Image (cartoon, grey):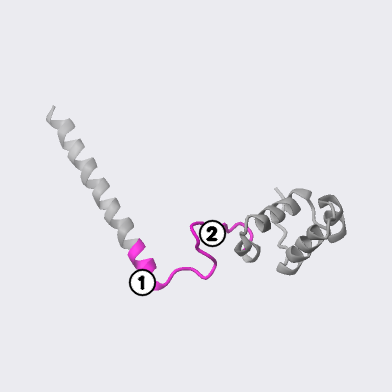
Amino acid sequence: MGTRTLHSYETKMKVIEMKLAGYSSRFIQTELGIKNVAQVKTWWRWYRNGEHYRFSQPVGKQYTFGKGPEGDTVEETQSLRIKSLEQQIELLKKYLERERMWFLK
């Protein structure tokens, strides 16, 4: 397993500029020293789909549902944590109820 290469935001924007100018993905890859042509195609797909926030996210961190690297506020984080804990409690209650029913049979 190899190490991950972190490309700068400027490199990614240069790729987009070159694609808009009509250069092929293979040419862009060799010119900018990118290891795999699939990376160029991925960045181009992100650009076409309007997913511009992805260009500035760290390697291996894909943020979903509109959450970016800036994260949530403390209140949002706490409310999500409370909701998660409440769901766990409900699940345990259901499990215990079914376990009781099983032993009564």
Task: Classify 91 as above or below 53.
Answer: above
Residue 75 is labelled as: 1
Q: Tell me if 44 is positioned left or right of 73 in this view.
A: right
Point 78% across, 63% down: residue: 17
From the top left corner, tell me how far across and down residue 14 is, in percent: 78, 65
From the top left corner, tell me how far across and down residue 104 is, in percent: 12, 31
From the top left corner, tell me how far across and down residue 95 is, in percent: 24, 41
From the top left corner, tell me how far across and down residue 8 is, in percent: 72, 67
- Is residue 66 rendered magenta in the image? yes
- Is residue 77 rendered magenta in the image? yes
Task: Classify 101 as above or below 84.
Answer: above
Q: Nearer the viewer, residue 104 or 19?
A: 19
Point 24% across, 49% down: residue: 90
Task: Classify 19 as above or below 9.
Answer: above
Q: Nearer the viewer, residue 105 or 63?
A: 63
The segment highlighted magenta reads 58-80
Q: Tell me if 92 is positioned left or right of 59 in this view.
A: left
Point 57% across, 57% down: residue: 62
Which residue bears the numbered disc 2? 63
Q: Secondary structure at mark 1?
A: helix
